[in-house]
């Protein structure tokens, strides 16, 4: 039987000059250990948080070489996430990591580590124009809800959250919590993600957890600064947070936020809420199909 109350943690991580892989992994381990200690079943990290691994190299790594340099750390990253998830009995949405696949394609990938040792993946479907032109990142081919021991979840990486059909696809597959790791360099970019994620909660009567990078990072090419105010967002109806915000970080400060999500409240809203977006769709007129 699915849990009726779930606790989620969102890491708003500050960019820091990082001289070793172990230094970054120790920071990740700290947040995972802390979230588990607070009883969280899920923890989410930001998009592109591993870019910090390039900041300690001299001379500065040219942007065109970034993906290949990061690929050297992909195996270790996956192993660390799985080990931490098993050790602390928590599902880790590992932000995202730019890496090159065996077929040569560059992708922006979120690795989701489960407490039972499984590792799932979600590739970013919509790379930004900058990701395409500077890093050569291509979009993934599928988006599917991910089975966890607490029910299905979805992952939309940053720009993906700005496409409503993707959130609907995940909701139709019974994802009731959608995690959005993001990285935006300006306040404008942050609010594009925030407003779209809030819309996704209304359209799909689900929860959305956002996790962003903040601060400045010297000695990196094409990711020098980031702006975020991470949040746990809810539908806008009776039984939920007044402003549709269950928890919210302070802008531009490293911290972890935690929120309790009432899954029964989603069921009630879908069945008898003030509005019933999922039930009231005009499927006789439109639908979301997937190849």
Image (spheres, grey):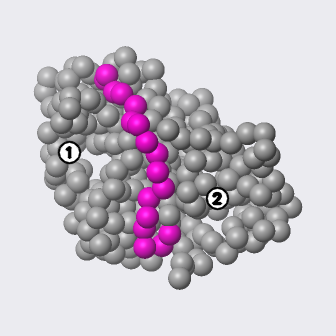
- Which residues make up the magenta segment? 135-151
- Disc number for residue 148: none
Residue closest to the eye, 100 or 19: 100
**Dot 1, crowdedness within 10 Å: few (<14), some or many (≥20)?**
some
* Residue 283 visible, this angle: yes
Residue closest to the eye, 175 or 279: 279
Outermost residue, bottom side: 1
Q: Is residue 109 above or below residue 268?
A: above
Residue closest to the eye, 196 or 126: 126
* Residue 248 visible, this angle: no
Q: Is residue 187 above or below residue 278?
A: above
Residue closest to the eye, 220 or 157: 157
Q: Main secondary structure of the magenta part?
A: loop
**Which residue is painted at 61% across and 59% down in the image?**
207
Label 1 and label 2: CA atoms lie apart by: 31 Å
The x and y percentages for residue 204 are 68, 53
The x and y percentages for residue 267 are 70, 70
Outermost residue, front side: 284
The x and y percentages for residue 202 are 72, 51
**Which residue is painted at 20% across and 23% down in the image?**
65
- Does 143 lie within the magenta span? yes
- Disc number for residue 206: 2
**Which residue is painted at 18% across and 36% down in the image?**
102
SS at mark 1 in the image: helix
SS at mark 2 in the image: loop
**Which residue is painted at 39% across and 47% down in the image?**
122
Q: Is residue 279 left or right of residue 32?
A: right
Q: Quadrant of residue 165?
A: top right
- Does 71 lie within the magenta span? no
Q: Quadrant of residue 147?
A: bottom left
- Disc number for residue 74: 1
């Amino acid at each position: 039987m699915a849990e009726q109350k779930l606790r989620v943690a969102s890491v708003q991580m500050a960019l820091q000059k990082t001289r070793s892989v172990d230094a970054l992994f120790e920071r990740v381990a700290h947040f995972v250990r802390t979230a588990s200690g607070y009883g969280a079943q899920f923890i989410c990290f930001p998009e592109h948080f591993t870019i910090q691994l390039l900041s300690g190299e001299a001379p500065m790594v040219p942007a065109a070489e970034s993906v290949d340099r990061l690929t050297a750390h992909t195996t270790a990253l996956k192993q660390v996430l799985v080990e931490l998830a098993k050790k602390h009995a928590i599902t880790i949405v590992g932000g995202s990591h730019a890496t090159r696949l065996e077929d040569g394609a560059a992708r922006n990938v979120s690795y989701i580590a489960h407490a039972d040792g499984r590792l799932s993946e979600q590739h970013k479907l919509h790379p930004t124009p900058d990701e395409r032109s500077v890093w050569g990142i291509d979009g993934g081919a599928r988006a599917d809800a991910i089975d966890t021991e607490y029910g299905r979840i979805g992952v939309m990486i940053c720009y993906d959250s700005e496409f409503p059909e993707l959130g609907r696809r995940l909701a139709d597959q019974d994802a009731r919590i959608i995690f959005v790791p993001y990285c935006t360099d300006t306040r404008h970019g942050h609010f594009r993600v925030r407003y779209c994620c809030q819309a996704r909660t209304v359209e799909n009567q689900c929860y959305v957890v956002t996790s962003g990078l903040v601060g400045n990072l010297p000695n990196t090419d094409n990711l020098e600064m980031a702006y975020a105010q991470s949040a746990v967002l809810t539908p806008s109806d009776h039984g939920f947070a007044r402003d549709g915000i269950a928890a919210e970080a302070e802008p531009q400060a490293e911290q972890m936020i935690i929120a309790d999500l009432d899954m029964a409240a989603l069921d009630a809203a879908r069945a008898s809420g003030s509005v019933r977006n999922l039930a009231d769709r005009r499927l006789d007129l439109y639908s979301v199909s997937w190849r």
